[in-house]
Amino acid sequence: MGLLEKALKYKKNLNTEGKQTLIDKIAGPAETERNITKPDIINFKNIDLLDEYESTNQKNNDILHLSEEDITEVVLDDDNISKVEEEIVFLDDDSVVVNGENKISDHFDLAEDEFNFDEYDDYHVLYEIFKDLIKCETPEQLYDVISFSVMGQLAVSSVSVLIPDDSDYIKIAHSTGINVTEPVSWSKNRGIFSKIVLTREIVDLDNYKDDKDYREDYYRFISVDGRLISPIFSGNSINGALLLGEKIENGIYSKMDYIFIQNITQMFKIALEKISRFNDVSSKFEIQSDERGVFDDVEAIQDGLSGVRNKYDFLQYIRKSFSDLGVKVFSIFTYNTDFDIYEPELFEEDNVLGINREEIRISYDDHLVRLLQTRKTPVAIDNFTESEVLTEIYGKRRIEQMKHYIVYPFVFSGEIPGFIVINDIEENIHIDEIDIRMRKIVKFLFPYFNEFHIFENNKIKPGAINNGEYLYLEKKFNDCKKINAPFSMVKVFFTNTGIIKADNGSELVFKWLQVAEKAILNKLSANDAIYKSGMDRYILILPGKDKKYISNIAAVLKKEIQENTEFNLSYIAVTGGVDGNDIFDLMELLN
C-alpha cells in the first residue's frame, strides 16, 4: 500500500472517532478567494501533523513511504504555540525565516546586494512616475515632472534636462533646484560626452575632477551643480541627458540609485519620443489644415473670376479679393510689348503710394526684372529703402511709405508677362499667410490679364476678328437689339504719332498715349468697353449709346487730349441694333 493510501486510511479512522487531521484543516482552492494563499503565520493548535518521514528509495526523493507507526497525532499547548509563532514565519514560496535566519531556496542565484525588497518597491514608484510622464503633452510639462520625480525620490540638490541644439552641442533646456541664468552647452563629439558615447553608461563626474584633459568640461558641469550624467541615446548618437546634482543626505549614490536613474531615464526617453511623435502628427495636421484653408481661398478667387464679364469688373474683383486676404498696399505690373516696359495695371483702391502709369514704369532690362528672370521665384527685398534701383523707379517718398517689398513674378516660357508687388499687409495677418496664397494666385491671375488684353488690345482687322472678341461684341449687340436700343462703335486714332516719335522719341509718345487712354477710360461706363487696334488706335464699344452721345463724347475727348498732348485726334462712328444690321456689318463700316 502506498503512502497516499495509508494516509487516507488513517484519516478515515480518526474522522470516525470525531477527530481531524491536518488535511481537514487546509482550505481547498474552491473555498478561497484566490487559488493560491500565502498565510503569514501558521497556527498549529489542534492540528494533526505528519511529523517525520524518510525516503525508502534513495534514487527517487519524490516518493515517500511511511509506516502506520510513523503517523502520530501531535497536540500543542498554548505555550508551545506562542513559541512556534515567534520562530516560524512564511515570507513567500521560497524564503522562510527560521530562528532569525533567512533561508533562501537554492534556485535563487543572487548576490545579497542584488536581492532585497526595496528594489520591488522602487519599481512600483517607477510605474507611478511613468504614468505621470506619459500624460505630459509638452516638453516643458515633461521636464517639470521628471525633475521633481527624481529630486523627490533620490533627494538630490538639482536636476537639469539636456537636449541637443541645432549644432553639434547639447544645452540645458530646463533646470530645477538651480538657477541657470546664461546658456550652458557641451560638445557632443569632444570632452566628457565623447567618453559617454563609448561607455553608454551613467557617469560620475567626480571621476574627472583630477583629469586635465577634461577639466574645462568638468568645471562647466560643476558650475551648474552637476554630479551624475545619465545619457539618452538615439542609435549611436546622444540625444540628450539628465544631469543630477549632489545627494543631499550623504553625498553617495548607491547601486539602487543607479538602477533607479537608468530606468527613469529610459522612461523619460519614451515619453519624450511620444511627445515628439504627437507634435509631428499635430504639425502635419496643422499644415494640412492650413493648406486646405489656402486651397479654399484660392479656389474661391478663381470661381469668382470665372464670372467676371469685363475688365473693369475684373480689376474691381481683384482689389476686393486682395483686401479680403489682408493685403493693404499692392500693385500689379503687366508687360507692354509696344514699349518693352512693365506698367502698373492695378493697385489698391486708396492708392496709398500714388501709383500711376505716367510716372511708374519699369524697363524690360531693369535690374529688378533681370533678377526676377534669373530667380524665377518670389523675391523679398529686405533693404529696399536703401535700394537705388527701387528709388529710381518709385521715388524716395513712395519708398519711405512701404512696409515690405515682395515681388511675385509670373513666369511663362522663360519670360515674365507680369508680377505682383506687396508693400503692406494688415497687422493681424502674418506675412507667411499672404506668401503661401500669392504663390498660388500669381499662377492663374496673369492668364486672366492676358485674356482681357487679348479681348481689349488685340488688333481688330476686317475678316480677322478673334472668336472671343466676336462673342463678346455679338452678345452686347444682341442685348441691345432685343430691347430696341442703339449699339455704337467708335474708332479713335491719332494721325501724327509717327512725326512726334521721330522728333521727340518714343518716351514722349508713350507718355502722351497714357494720358489719352486715361482720358478715354474716364469717360466710359461699366457697361462700355475699349479695344486697342494698334499702338495709337482705340475702338470704343458703347451699348445703349446713340449718335448724339457719340458726337458729344468725341468732342470732349478731342478737346481734353489736345490740351494735354500734341496729338491730332480723329474718329469714325457707326450705330446699329435698330436698323437690322448685324455685328459684321458694323465692323465693315467701321473699317
Image (spheres, helix red, strand yellow):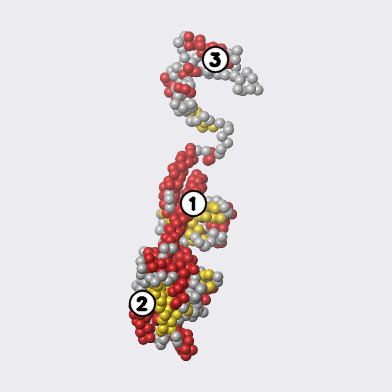
**Image side of residue 239 versus residue 475, left or right:** right
Q: Quadrant of the N terminus?
A: top right
Q: Mark 2 and mark 1: span between their CA atoms?
A: 75 Å
Q: Mark 2 and mark 3: span between their CA atoms?
A: 135 Å
Q: Relative to the observer, which residue lies in front, 483 or 10?
A: 483
Q: Nearer the viewer, mark 2 or mark 1?
A: 2
In which quadrant of the rendered view does residue 174 lie?
bottom left
Residue 237 visible somewhere in the drawing: yes
- Say which residue label 1 marks: 277
Compared with 96, 180 (above or below) is: below
Q: Position of residue 354 (x, y in %)?
A: 37, 77
- Mark 3 neighbour density, 10 Å: few (under 14) some (14–19) many (20 or more): some
- Say which residue label 3 marks: 7
Seen at 49% across and 71% down, the residue is: 466
Q: Earlier in the sequence, mark 2 or mark 3?
A: 3
Q: Nearer the viewer, mark 1 or mark 3?
A: 1
- Say which residue label 2 marks: 547
Compared with 68, 390 (above or below) is: below
Q: Relative to the observer, which residue lies in front, 513 or 525?
A: 525
Compared with 430, 11 (above or below) is: above
Q: Under tag 2, what secondary structure?
A: helix
Seen at 47% across and 14% down, the residue is: 20
Q: Position of residue 398 (x, y in %)?
A: 39, 78
Q: Amino acid at mark 3?
A: Ala
Q: Relative to the observer, which residue lies in front, 286 or 67?
A: 286
Q: Position of residue 250 (x, y in %)?
A: 45, 49
- Mark 2 neighbour density, 10 Å: few (under 14) some (14–19) many (20 or more): some
Q: Earlier in the sequence, mark 1 or mark 3?
A: 3
